[in-house]
């Protein structure tokens, strides 16, 4: 694996999940993205969709990562169909930076469904 991909990985919780060094309930996996159940679910459906490449946050995205982002949302859409939540509706959230509530610095899309959601979000 390229050095740039490994950068920042050493103490990254989600990189450990990708490497299967920390157990998780993986619901989707390919060479570019994985999805697993959030350990502290905030809704009946609460999945995290993450790139295999270590990217700390949306703020660290580079133009060369465009295809990764597209793929992440393609996986979100696929999971929403598989989980049968398209009709009910679902919310996707990306917290970027501590001030916005980001606690794990490996880019992740929260996919939430199964309860009402307020707007504006809290
Ligand atoms: P954020 O606060 O947006 O950075 O989201 C991080 C999410 O990771 C939170 O919803 C946590 O509940 C979740 N999380 C933390 N540790 C784990 C873990 N070991 N397995 C699954 N989800 C986790
Ligand atoms: Zn990572």
Image: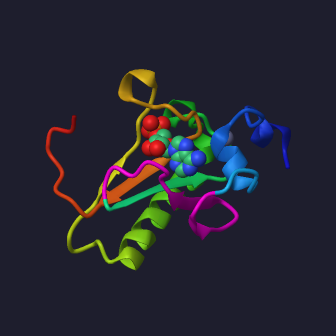
Residue placed furthest toward the top: 99
Q: What residue lies at 21% left-to-right and 39% top-to-bottom?
A: 121
User: Taking 102 as reference, is 44 left or right?
Assistant: left
Q: How is the image coloured?
A: rainbow
Residue 40 lies in the magenta-colored region: yes
Residue 26 lies in the magenta-colored region: yes
Residue 75 rendering spot, x and y as whole percentages: 49, 65
Q: How many marks?
A: 0
Name above or below for residue 27 compared with residue 63. below
User: Taking 67 as reference, is 95 left or right?
Assistant: left
Q: Is residue 92 visible?
A: yes
In the depicted view, which residue is nearer to us: 24 or 51?
24
In the depicted view, which residue is nearer to us: 13 or 86?
13
In the depicted view, which residue is nearer to us: 14 or 75?
14
Q: What residue lies at 66% left-to-right and 68% top-to-bottom?
A: 30
Q: What residue lies at 57% left-to-right and 63% top-to-bottom?
A: 25
Residue 71 rendering spot, x and y as whole percentages: 54, 60
Looking at the figure, which quarter contains the C terminus? top left
What range is drawn magenta here?
A: 24-43
Q: Is residue 66 visible?
A: no
In the depicted view, which residue is nearer to us: 43 or 98?
43
Residue 76 rendering spot, x and y as whole percentages: 44, 63
Name above or below for residue 50 compared with residue 101. below
Name above or below for residue 91 compared with residue 65. below
| Residue 28 sits in quarter | bottom right
User: Taking 7 as reference, is 35 left or right?
Assistant: left
| Residue 95 sits in quarter | top left
Q: What residue lies at 39% left-to-right and 21% top-to-bottom?
A: 99
């Amino acid at each position: 694996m390229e050095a740039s991909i490994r950068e920042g990985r050493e103490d990254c919780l989600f990189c450990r999940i990708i490497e299967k060094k920390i157990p998780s309930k993986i619901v989707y996996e390919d060479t570019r993205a994985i999805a697993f159940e959030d350990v502290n679910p905030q809704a009946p459906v609460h999945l995290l969709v993450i790139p295999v490449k270590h990217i700390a946050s949306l703020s660290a995205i580079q133009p060369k990562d465009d295809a990764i982002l597209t793929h992440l949302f393609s996986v979100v859409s696929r999971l929403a169909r598989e989980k049968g939540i398209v009709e009910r509706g679902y919310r996707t959230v990306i917290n970027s930076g501590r001030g916005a509530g980001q606690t794990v610095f490996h880019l992740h899309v929260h996919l939430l469904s199964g309860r009402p959601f307020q707007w504006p979000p809290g």
